[in-house]
Amino acid sequence: MIAALLERASRRAAQADAVLKTDETTSLEFAAGELVSARTAQCQGLSLRVVAEGRAGFSGTVSDDLDDLLERALASAAAGDPTVLTLPPPAPLPAVLTHVPRAAAATVPELVAICHLVRDRMAGEQAELSISLERSIGSVRVANSRGVDASYDASLVSLAVRASRLRTGRRVMIEARLSGADLPALPDLEAVVGMLRQRLAWAERDTEIAPGRQRVLFLPAALPALLQPVEQGLAGKAALERSSLAGWRRGTRALSELLSLTDDPLASGRPGSRPVDDEGIPSRTTPLVKAGTIEGLIYDLETASRVGAAPTGHGRRSTFGKPQTACTNLVVEAGQTSWRDLLAAVGDGLVVERVRAAGPANVAGGMFAFPVTLGWRVVGGEVTGLLPEVTIAGNAHDLLNRIIAVGSDLFWVGSRAAPPVVVEGVSLF
Amino acid sequence: MKNLLTDVLRSARADHTEIRLERTWATAIAFRGSRLEGATTAIESGGMVRCLNRGRGWGVASFTGFDQLRGMVSLANELSLALPVATPIRLGDIPVRSEDHAANLDGDVRGVSLGAKRDLLERLNQDMLGSDRRIVDTHVAYEDAVTERWLATSAGVMLYDLRPSVRLSAAAVAREESFLERAFESWSVRGGWHSVEAADQLFRGAARRAVALLAAPRVKAGTYPVVLDSRCMGALVHQAIGHLCEADTLAERPDLDRLMQPGQRVASDLVTVGDDGSASSLSGSLPFDDEGAPTQNTLLVQHGVLVGRLHTRETAGRAGQRPTGNARAGSFRRVPAARLTNTYVANGRGTLDDLIRSIPLGLYCCDAMGGETTYGRFSLRTGYAHLIRNGQLGELTKPVVLAGDIAETLQRVDGIAGDFRWNQLGSACIRAGSGRITVSEGAPHVRVNGVLVGGEPV
């Protein structure tokens, strides 16, 4: 289908590229120990870009009507701005694990067995348990009029386990997640159970805390909320925008020297792993921040051509709309500090495990105010119990310069990997 | 399409089969500064089949295109049969009927060229960019859609709906030295090309405010008497009351369920709150929900006391009540959940001046730029605010963050003006599982005697 589309597009446009993505996702949900919902979702999307008379146009479809797709892309180009875009030539792709046959072939009873294992291991805990498991099997094919024709298969298994318990009228919900191209291994499932049990034990005691500036240990699940404006600043597009205060370029000292960040599409079997981006650029690891100093920015093809930089392989396409710049797997480098010493560095403060950060923060300025949905009080370097409901606020750019310790263990949360990080001067109210 | 649905349902084997199909024509155009980000059209189609059998759970299959419909009905039934459940699922009854709802397309957006739509947006954008040298950036977007939706069940429900929508949004960024301020406006209606002209002032308003905010002072954090405008109160009530009345959320949260029982006081007796999916032409308006239940006006809080909940067929069946028409899904890919439509605070008496007159030092909070609730507490970031001094509106201030305990805050409402309005903002509500839906809110001006104001976090 994609070859026929490009052949037709080449007759009417100087350049064209297309991405065909297919996906079949099976989802299971357990509540109160029993399977309550089973779902399957099948989808296919074909996205086309043409460059005609020096202007780029985009269209997408979920059907097989290639003529309609092409006509709409040409109409989009006619309404578009001039572009200097040059599509890439074919190039060798790196090897990266994105698909594990046994995960792709797992039957529904095999997936159910994983959920049962977690359920049974948690049976002794006085907690309400809900488990959801999703297994996606998909394929990506990207091709262009210069001869690129790359494809890969992908499998992704995502497990979320939530244990909740009522504490003095408040429901405390503890959540653990695993995701990867393979089925979760037994030690990983044991680690999930161990983490849930430890948190349930911590939640046995209520604590209090006074408003004001605090030292905060951000756990990996809470850190992405803080890193959101940094991710935006690292998109090469921000350098083109007069509204970006960050104005980051290579060599800018932007963050604490304890912080190093890498984008790693070649990490084995992670949600953002891929051998090629959605515009045909081979994947490679991109150092972004080294000891607080900007080492590199990420680009999609169009942004790279606008700023005169080499494309970095960070184009991401949905079925509809144009490619956008996006990180693949964002990895915060582990530091030197043990868990015990991280708590000692907090001294008297708090651990933030999860925040509610779905709403639009003022990303450009870095300002945020997040209610803490799960947190722990730390006194004298020890976790003393469950944090009351509080809100943390501050400026992310400012706080990421006030990191005082970085943990030595790295944890993956979806396509983000990070160690626990201690920040001082976080406003609490 | 109806013949296909009738034919497929005739051979469906589950005790209950529900098919929802959608076809959407959509346009999206965006500028960043003076540069066009993209101008695209899309045609998307797909559906979801849900099956339920006695003593079994839900089997669900979603798909793009319509070609695989028959196979998906079988698959959803097989999945349901594989799910024995201890507690039987009972669905609330909905009227069995066959109805067509074709809204006025109000100048069908499908008949307007992409170039004409781009020209409109470019003109409004340039107007904003040229309004002041301190406007350094803009993000503007035009979106339109015409959606066809079919909903059919094995019990004989056969519904069709054709709806247009248009949305404009404008963000202006003003900069002076190292100070950066941003103002945002959006507008959305269930209308077509003819209604777009009404949004002409939207963009200039955003630019003016972004510039004015550059010189505006910060507010010192503390507890103040505040007056909330319609947008701010609408957002607060959506977050703080609306979400706590979603019956499926409460079913998963026994702790909240106990707190949110009918008869429980959650606000001062001045406060009456409802949700009305049947209101005319608002972003959350629909003739029927994504399970086929007719939409309606549901009272949630009357004189400060909880009186109602928003239901899907499943939660209504469990509670022995009627579905309220609130089962909504972001698209055919999503399973419907009990969601908000157009949420409102009922009108009071008097004017904004009446509310302000007795305040020696307070804040007039306007617009909402996003909020969060953890059910016990809320936080809400305003678009801007004005100081109130000695009963008079004072200077513009930087945005503030309001936060606090929901029930405590709403019980301190001590004045509601008689100037109710629906806000035609391009608001969206996002929930894990059922996805992103369009909603709207309406409220008059409301005074709260004491809200924790976080000021601008620094």
Image (cartoon, coloured by chain):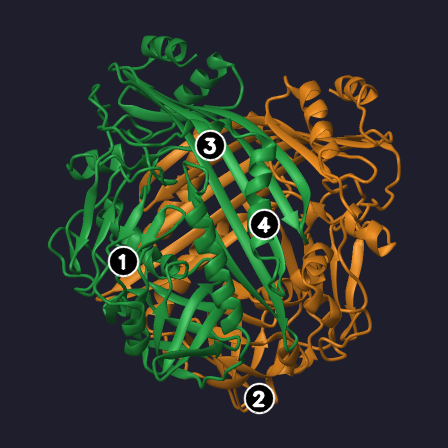
Chain colours: A green, B orange
Question: Where is residue A316 drawn, in percent x and y?
Answer: 35, 35
Q: CA distance from mark 2 to mark 4?
A: 51 Å
Q: In this orientation, which residue lies closer to the viewer: B194 or A30?
A: A30
Q: Which residue is mark 3?
A: A103
Asked whether the viewer can see residue B320, the reply is: yes
* CB-based contact (under 8 Å), mark 3 and mark 4: no
Is residue B396 found left or right of B270 in the rendered image?
left
Quadrant of res B133: bottom left
Quadrant of res B445: bottom right
Quadrant (top left, top right, bottom left, bottom right) of the N terminus of chain B:
top right
* CB-based contact (under 8 Å), mark 1 and mark 4: no
The chain ID associated with circle 2 is B
Disc 4 is placed on an element classified as strand
Amino acid found under the numbered disc labelled 1: Arg
Is residue A347 found left or right of A109 in the rendered image?
left
Question: Where is residue B407 drawn, in percent x and y?
Answer: 66, 77
* CB-based contact (under 8 Å), mark 1 and mark 2: no
Amino acid found under the numbered disc labelled 4: Ile
> Sequence-wise, which precedes: disc 3 or disc 4?
3
Is residue A360 found left or right of B236 in the rendered image?
left
Question: Where is residue B248 drawn, in percent x and y?
Answer: 71, 54
Q: Which residue is mark 2?
A: B359
Amino acid found under the numbered disc labelled 3: Ala
Of badges 2 and 4, the one in the foreground is: 4
Q: Which residue is mark 4?
A: A131
Of badges 3 and 2, the one in the foreground is: 3
Q: CA distance from mark 1 to mark 3?
A: 57 Å
